[in-house]
Amino acid sequence: MLAQLEDAPVGAGLPLEHVLERLPFDHNGLIAALAQQFDTGEVLMLAWMNRDALDETLATGFACYWSRSRQALWRKGETSGCRQRVVEVRFDCDGDAVLLLVEQMGGACHTGRRSCFYNAVRGGRVEVVLAPIASSPRCTAPGQEPCADA
């Protein structure tokens, strides 16, 4: 479907509803969604969206995902305050992934870190490279499951 745009000039496009109707959601009705800080390019997190989550994100301008563990919509930051204001939504070339360029408010990770990608391979081991943000709440209250559900 998005292959129609591969050789198109800048400014060419397709109607949004036409694209949304043809996204290749997987057998669970999900599509991968990557959140990236809009101004720095920092990769914040990977989550999943169903059509309802994508529609809500587009309608509200705030990131909404599908929690696979809870089987429910997950409005990022609804309880923690660590919301993601969506600046732009993009699709990859074959339409099987969504990129949300966001303004991250607080940490994106349930651990209170800026990014969920805080473990790096260094010298034959995996090393923590980002500390939690001191002022950022964790996404979970005591006794609740984490909001990240990889």
Image (cartoon, grey):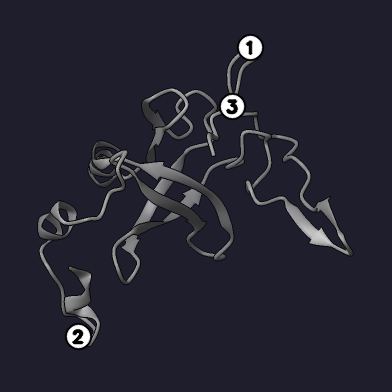
Q: Residues within 10 Å of mark 2 (few under 14, many from 20)?
A: few
Image x and y of residue 80, in percent? 54, 27
Q: Is 47 drawn above or below residue 81 in the view shown? A: below
Q: How many residues crowd around disc 3 within 10 Å: few (fewer than 14), some, or many (20 or more)? A: some
Tell me the kind of residue under disc 2.
Ala
Amino acid type, callout 1 = Gly
Q: Residue at x 60, y 22 (%)?
A: 140
Q: Could you say where residue 146 lies in the image, as x and y percent from the top left? A: 59, 27
Mark identifier at residue 146: 3
Q: Nearer the viewer, residue 91 or 26?
A: 26
- Is 56 displayed left or right of 36 in the figure? left
Which residue corresponds to mark 2?
A: 8
At label 3, the amino acid type is Pro
Residue drawn at the location 30% of the way across and 68% of the way down: 94
Mark 2 → mark 1, Cα distance in angstroms: 51 Å
Whole-number angstrom distance, CA of label 2 to CA of label 3:
42 Å
Vertical position of residue 65 compared to residue 7: above or below: above
Estimate the x, y position of residue 57 in percent, counting from the top left: 30, 43
Q: Quadrant of residue 134?
A: top right
Q: Classify 32 as above or below 76.
A: below
Question: Label 1: which residue?
Answer: 143
The secondary element bearing badge 3 is classed as loop
Q: Secondary structure at mark 1?
A: loop
